[in-house]
Image (tube, rainbow, N blue to C red):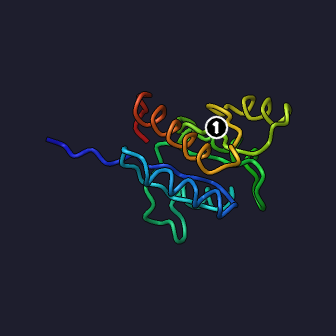
Amino acid sequence: MTLQKSPHILQVEDSQADALMTREALQDSDMSCRISIVEDGVEALEFLNQRGKYKSSEPPDLILLDLNMPRKNGRELLAELKAHPKFRSIPVIVLTTSRAVEDIASAYDLHANCYIIKPVDFLSYSETIRAIQAFWLSIVTLGEQ
């Protein structure tokens, strides 16, 4: 019998409030899940490439990506991830406040797996996070990372 590890989410998010809401929503869920949070695209690449303080990090099963961040924004990171053979199969969910048509089109052009506009209240945000978790980590069959 093999023990299956709980799914792992990497959230790339510069808002501490949104990161905290994600953690709380996942803790309130019936499904066990691990989450790692980094603040921008530069830190995400350090995490994914297991460099520096992330030397022992585990690859995520799913990435939640904000678009508007300092240093390396979500668009730049998404382009790099989907161009890299090691990372392109990891589903990337753009989770952002932007409703701009050009941001939505750009995310899909860069091969985002889906685009979700962040709800502003905690209850709706929590429901959205749990729906992402249920669909992407329970219903969808993901490949090995």
Callout 1 crowding tier (Cα within 10 Å): few <14, some 14–19, many ≥20: some
User: Percent position (x, y) of residue 122?
Assistant: 62, 51
Quadrant into which the N terminus falls:
top left
Instruction: From the image, tell me which residue sits under label 1.
Output: 82
Q: Give above or below for 75 relative to 104.
A: below
Name the residue rendered at 65%, 64% in the picture.
16
Q: Nearer the viewer, residue 14 or 125?
A: 125
Q: Nearer the viewer, residue 61 or 25?
A: 25
User: On the rendered structure, is 14 left or right of 93?
Assistant: right
Name the residue rendered at 37%, 44% in the picture.
31
User: Percent position (x, y) of residue 22?
Assistant: 55, 53
User: Percent position (x, y) of residue 67?
Assistant: 74, 47
Q: Give above or below for 27 relative to 126.
A: below
| Rendered image quadrant of residue 115 | top right
Q: Nearer the viewer, residue 37 or 99?
A: 99
Residue type at numbered disc 1: Lys
